[in-house]
Amino acid sequence: MKKYNEYKDFGIKWLGEIPEHWKSVRLKFLSEIIPSNVDKKTREGEKEVFLCNYVDVYKNDYITRKILFMRATASDVQIAKLTLSQNDVIATKDSEDPKDIGVPALVKQSFDKVVCGYHLTLMRSNTELLNGNFLYWFILSDRSSKYFYTEARGITRYAIGSSTFKNLVLALPPLEEQTQIANYLDSKTQQIEALIDKKERLIALLEEERTAIINQAVTKGLDPNVKMRDSGIDWLGEIPGHWELVKLKYLTRIRYGLGQPPMQKEGGLPIIRATNIFRGTISEENMIYVDPDDLPLNREPILKENEIIVVRSGAYTADSAIIDKKWEGTVTGYDLVMTPKTVNPKLLSFALLSTYMLDNQLFLERLRAAQPHLNSEELGNTFMLLPPDFEQSDLVDFIENELLRLNEIKKKVKKEIDLLKEYKTALISEVVTGKVDVREEALN
């Protein structure tokens, strides 16, 4: 992409040089800045309205009639000032995370009874000076985001005042060029988002393939010519004739994890909780560390390689993960722990992720109580399709190789998604600050 012929420096470090024919203008000279004080309460004597609230702005690029706005009330003054009009820009003005301040959304159409809600600031541009769509893209740029981040004040909750919005310096091209830039970014970012959507759908398909590979291997085996027999269970159908149906309590020893959480200690032992387990993997995100001297040793809290954690309660009930070398010596949380005795641990870990165990057995058990829950008896009475010992190792090798192949593809696709997102962010910033000239591309 080409650059403009001439640039000038206005002395604003975060903005850098801008094209010679552009201006450097504070937002307060271009737009009305209206912080909202309309909350979610319904007050007697006020008029009923629909409220465009924080979540509507934070989760949507555009405010349209597709959004299901909540009902509230507002005064006549609030309605007059804050009813949404086409090309208004709304941005978050406070949040628990300073990175979430200054997140914008563009109002795509005028509304009769929808007003801008609390925690938000509405910007209504002078249409003879500023294109609302251009303003949206400028505020969305990472340069504006960094400005809002540095201006945010607070400890547990962060906020910016109206003066921060008013003093935002825009690199301002002529009005016609603003429209060209906005139209170009509308089109180009849609193309980028379409590519990202395709790649995210591919990841979803890879996850489906992962589940299908595990299901096929642990219920039918690897030999397409093997003699089958009726399992006697309607939803399971036929299984290899030489496989057995065995309850987990005969294959493993099941114990409960800790009843009470130990004292936390920086530099202590990692404790694996339900929130660290997802579809057979263990995540370090939000991992906490505990004092090893505060562990009740009679509960066998130290995990060994090839033991399996099964989530005992809550939203993740019945999810599981095997302990590999990396996590050996860590601490079990509140959940159930299985120590395989007469079954290949890895094969059992794959079977626990399969449809015939999860959907048709464990998920049904966890829903019997008011809250999702699973106890050792219910887990122990869950049956597993058990191949002979020699076949178990072959199945594990096959599944591991297939999942490794899928993981490599998924890793590559995720990297491509990250690069597309980085490109989109860089493109927006470069275009709205005039580092590249897109006028001809916009026309084409």
Image (spheres, grey):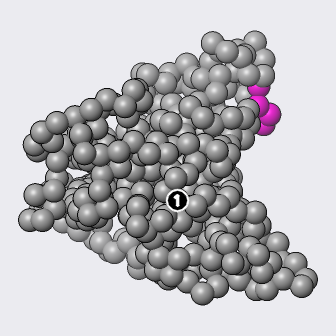
Q: Going 68% across and 67% down the picture, which residue do you hit? A: 117
Q: Position of residue 23 (x, y in %)?
A: 35, 45
In the image, taking residue 188 as reference, residue 331 lies left or right, namely: right
Q: Position of residue 400 (x, y in %)?
A: 26, 40
Q: Is residue 70 visible?
A: no
Q: Name the residue under label 1.
A: 31
Q: Position of residue 282 (x, y in %)?
A: 48, 36
Element on which disc 1 rests: strand
**In which quadrant is the C terminus drawn?**
bottom left
Q: Which of 28 and 420 is in front in this view?
A: 28
Give the farthest residue toward the right.
Answer: 44
In the image, taking residue 110 as reference, residue 385 lies left or right, namely: left
Residue 1 within the segment the image draws in magenta? no
Label total for image: 1
User: Quadrant of the rendered structure where residue 331 is?
Assistant: top right
User: Quadrant of the rendered structure where residue 91 is?
Assistant: bottom right
Q: Which of 317 and 167 is in front in this view?
A: 167
Q: Residues within 10 Å of mark 1 (few under 14, many from 20)?
A: many
Q: Can residue 82 be seen in this view?
A: yes
Q: Going 41% across and 38% down the picture, which residue do you hit? A: 143
User: Quadrant of the rendered structure where residue 207 is?
Assistant: bottom left
* Image position of 247 with respect to 45: above or below: above
Q: Going 51% across and 31% down the picture, which residue do you hit? A: 284
**Disc 1 residue type (three-letter):** Ser
Q: Going 53% across and 65% down the picture, which residue do you hit? A: 124
Q: Where is residue 255 in the image (x, y as percent from the top left)?
A: 66, 38
Residue 259 within the segment the image draws in magenta? yes
Q: Which of 306 and 409 is in front in this view?
A: 409
* Image position of 56 with respect to 304: above or below: below
* Image position of 146 with respect to 378: above or below: above
Q: Main secondary structure of the magenta part?
A: loop
Residue bounds of the magenta highlight: 258-262
